[in-house]
Amino acid sequence: MANTACARHILVKTREQAEDIIRRLNKGEDFGKLAKKFSTCPSGKKGGDLGEFRRGQMVKAFDDVVFKKKVLEIHGPVKTKFGFHVIQTIFRT
């Protein structure tokens, strides 16, 4: 079972915004550019990159996606107390 992962995300206030971003990603738009433009998280400045983190460091709903869903696919919208996330896991170790 993986204990660390690297992921990036785009955090927005509404489900509708997250769904629109997912549609744009599915049409081929660049994740990093969309993160810089729309994400309310400070990581948006880095294209949504959260770097490497350990299991349990993020809120449960976020962790569940990063550590259980397919790597490199786009997942979301994922609701947490912070808003709605569009998540892509880069790798797990």
Image (tube, helix red, strand yellow):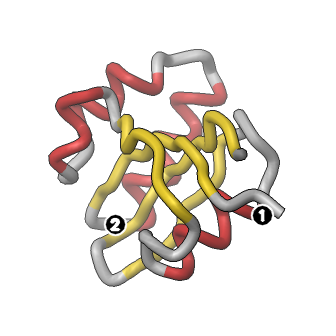
Q: Position of residue 20 (x, y in %)?
A: 47, 44
- Label 2 sits on residue: 14
Classed neighbour count for the residue bearing mark 1: other residues with Cα under 10 Å, few (<14), some (14–19), many (≥20): few
- Disc 2, SS: loop
**Observer-nearest of 83 and 2:** 2
**What is the spatial separation of the Cα atoms under label 2 and label 1, in whole angstroms?**
24 Å
Residue at image location 57% in from the left, 68% down from the top:
55
Q: Position of residue 88 (x, y in %)?
A: 59, 42
Q: Position of residue 56 (x, y in %)?
A: 52, 76
Q: Is residue 82 left or right of residue 90?
A: left
> In the rendered view of the protein, which quadrant contains the N terminus?
bottom right
Disc 2 marks a residue whose amino acid type is Thr
Residue at image location 44% in from the left, 66% down from the top:
15
Q: In the rendered structure, which disc, 2 or 1, sits on the residue that comes first in sequence?
A: 2
Residue at image location 62% in from the left, 21% down from the top:
27
Disc 1 marks a residue whose amino acid type is Lys
**Observer-nearest of 55 and 47:** 55
Toward which corner of the image does residue 46 lie, by quadrant?
A: top left
**Observer-nearest of 18 and 10:** 10
